[in-house]
Image: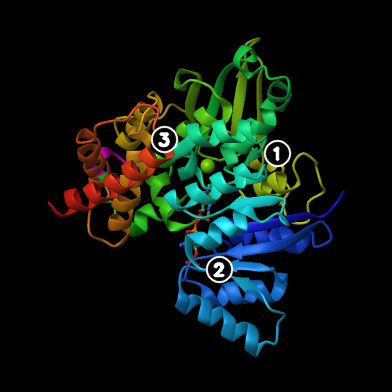
């Protein structure tokens, strides 16, 4: 096997650092060609540059470029090309010396670099679900045109991808699949009453029972917007209607998701809730490589797996996303953009937890959907959603 040359956008975050942990454990099989991150953890990015020696780096602005340059000078490291801003993210995505682009940034920011990598026919290890939510139809259309491969990193979609592989390879998903069973832990508020949730704090919402993740996705998990975004992500990744995507609450997060086939057989994928498992799979796809990092699971030690129906009334965000998933227009993009702003406002302590869906409902009710939106329409809809959400939040 030739070593995989990878680039990571969002290398200092939860997915980014776990990706580098896999790279660290498999230095003979993975070389790191490019790293991009925001400005919050520049020192960590510097350490990553020192350890992995990428040729290409991107940071958001000139001040961050200066910081990296000073570090490289003081450590006497070989020169690195540093390109700031979106131009840098797209340069990493288009770089012909890299085979796999790991999209580990949060939010709509991932759309342009993902599309750029697809146009180069790359393998995309896709963690950045918001790109699929906002622009899924464009992603799948372009990926087919340029023979790009999208391997999901999101644990549920990785599980479905692995379970579906024989049908995907035969191009028989439409005829062989009865439904996708998208599992979710139910988040920290699964057992809370609606009344208790009225007083849920930021700290309560940030306490995910099973997964350790970045702040935005942790809040999305608490509102169950995350599962809703995942319905939309699954819809595009596997080209199935929402009527064939069923959310099942599974508090232990061991069955990462499953596929029910038309003959009644259910095939799923299991593992401990550790993102290094789907990341490892995506980095080495289509091969199976022995893992140095992924913890092993004992079914007997786990003992019991339980399943239940989701409560759409208690989690209105799940219902909102499910509805947006049924239409082929700009609604999902607007829901995504507004959600980024509203969640940020909750994280800053400006609004209550239960105000998240209320604000989103208001933005959505004011949106005039655009059918089969172009990239330009998507960029406009995202912008509109953010502005509208800011207005609604201050009203
Ligand atoms: P984090 O918030 O932990 O990390 C986000 C990364 O993006 C950081 O490296 C951050 O840099 C970087 N970033 C921020 N702004 C920019 C910018 N302008 N240019 C380049 N990079 C930037 O997020 P997660 O790792 O939790 O999530 C990443 C994606 O993966 C999300 O879409 C999420 O939904 C998805 N996902 C995550 C899972 C998880 O377990 N975490 C599970 C399944 C999906 P910095 O902070 O240093 O400024
Ligand atoms: Mg997930």
Q: Could you classify mark 2 by the number of other residues whose Cα lies within 10 Å: few (under 14), some (14-19), or many (20 or more)? A: many
Q: Residue furthest right?
A: 1
* Gap in angstroms between the C-alphas marked 3 and 2: 28 Å
Instruction: Using the rendered view, name the quadrant where residue 91 is placed.
Output: bottom right
Which mark is drawn over residue 300?
Answer: 1
Q: Which mark is residue 374?
A: 3
Whether residue 341 appears in this view of the structure is yes
Q: Does the Cβ of the disc 3 residue fall within 8 Å of ligand 1?
A: no
Query: Compared with residue 50, is residue 281 higher up or lower down, i.e. above or below?
Result: above
Label 3 element class: loop
Q: Which residues are magenta?
A: 190-196
- Disc 1 element: helix
Identified at 51% across, 55% down, the residue is 105
Mark 3 or mark 1: name the one nearer the start of the chain. Answer: 1
Disc 2 element: loop
Name the residue nearer the viewer: 313 or 128. Answer: 128
Q: Position of residue 340 (x, y in %)?
A: 35, 50
Q: Is mark 2 within 8 Å of ligand 1?
A: no
Q: Which numbered marker is on residue 83?
A: 2
Camera-side residue of 236 and 195: 236
Left or right side of 370 for 53: right
Between 261 and 186, the one lying in front of the other is 261
Cα distance in 3D space between marks 3 and 1: 50 Å
Query: Quick check: 1 above or below 182?
Result: below
Name the residue furthest top: 263
Contact between marks 3 and 1 (CB within 8 A): the answer is: no
Relative image position of residue 243 (x, y in whole percent): 45, 18
Which quadrant of the figure has residue 363? Answer: top left
Residue 89 rendering spot, x and y as whole percentages: 54, 59
Tell me, yes or no, whether the highlighted magenta stretch contains residue 193: yes
């Amino acid at each position: 096997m030739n070593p995989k040359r990878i680039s990571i956008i969002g290398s200092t975050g939860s997915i980014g650092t776990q990706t580098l942990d896999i790279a660290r454990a498999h230095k003979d099989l993975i070389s790191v060609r490019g790293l991009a991150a925001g400005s919050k953890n520049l020192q960590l990015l510097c350490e990553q540059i020192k350890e992995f020696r990428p040729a290409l780096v991107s940071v958001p602005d000139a001040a961050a470029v200066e910081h990296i340059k000073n570090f490289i000078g003081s450590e006497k490291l070989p020169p690195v090309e540093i390109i700031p801003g979106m131009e840098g993210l797209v340069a990493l995505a288009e770089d012909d010396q890299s085979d796999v682009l790991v999209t580990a940034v949060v939010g709509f920011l991932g759309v342009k670099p993902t599309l750029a990598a697809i146009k180069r026919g790359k393998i995309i290890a896709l963690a950045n679900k918001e790109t699929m939510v906002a622009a899924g139809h464009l992603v799948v259309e372009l990926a087919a045109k340029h023979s790009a491969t999208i391997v999901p990193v999101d644990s549920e979609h990785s599980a479905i991808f692995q379970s579906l592989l024989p049908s995907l390879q035969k191009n028989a998903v439409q005829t062989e699949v009865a439904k996708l069973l998208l599992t979710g832990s139910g988040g920290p508020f699964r057992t809370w009453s609606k009344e208790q949730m009225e007083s849920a704090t930021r700290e309560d919402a940030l306490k995910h029972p099973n997964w350790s993740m970045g702040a935005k996705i942790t809040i999305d998990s608490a509102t169950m917007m995350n599962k809703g975004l995942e319905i939309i992500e699954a819809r595009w990744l596997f080209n199935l209607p929402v009527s064939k995507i069923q959310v099942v609450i599974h508090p232990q997060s061991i069955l990462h998701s499953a596929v029910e086939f038309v003959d009644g057989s259910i095939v799923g994928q299991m593992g401990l809730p550790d993102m290094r498992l789907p990341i490892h799979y995506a980095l080495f796809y289509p091969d199976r490589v022995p893992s140095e990092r992924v913890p092993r699971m004992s079914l007997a030690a786990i003992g019991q797996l339980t399943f239940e129906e989701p409560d759409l009334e208690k989690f209105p965000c799940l219902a909102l996303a499910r509805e947006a998933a049924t239409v082929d227009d700009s609604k999902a993009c607007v829901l995504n953009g507004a959600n980024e702003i509203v969640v940020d406002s909750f994280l800053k302590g400006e609004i209550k937890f239960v105000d998240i869906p209320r604000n989103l409902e208001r933005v959505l009710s004011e949106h005039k959907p655009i059918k089969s939106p172009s990239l330009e329409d998507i960029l406009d809809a995202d912008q509109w959603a953010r502005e509208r959400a800011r207005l609604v939040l201050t009203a």
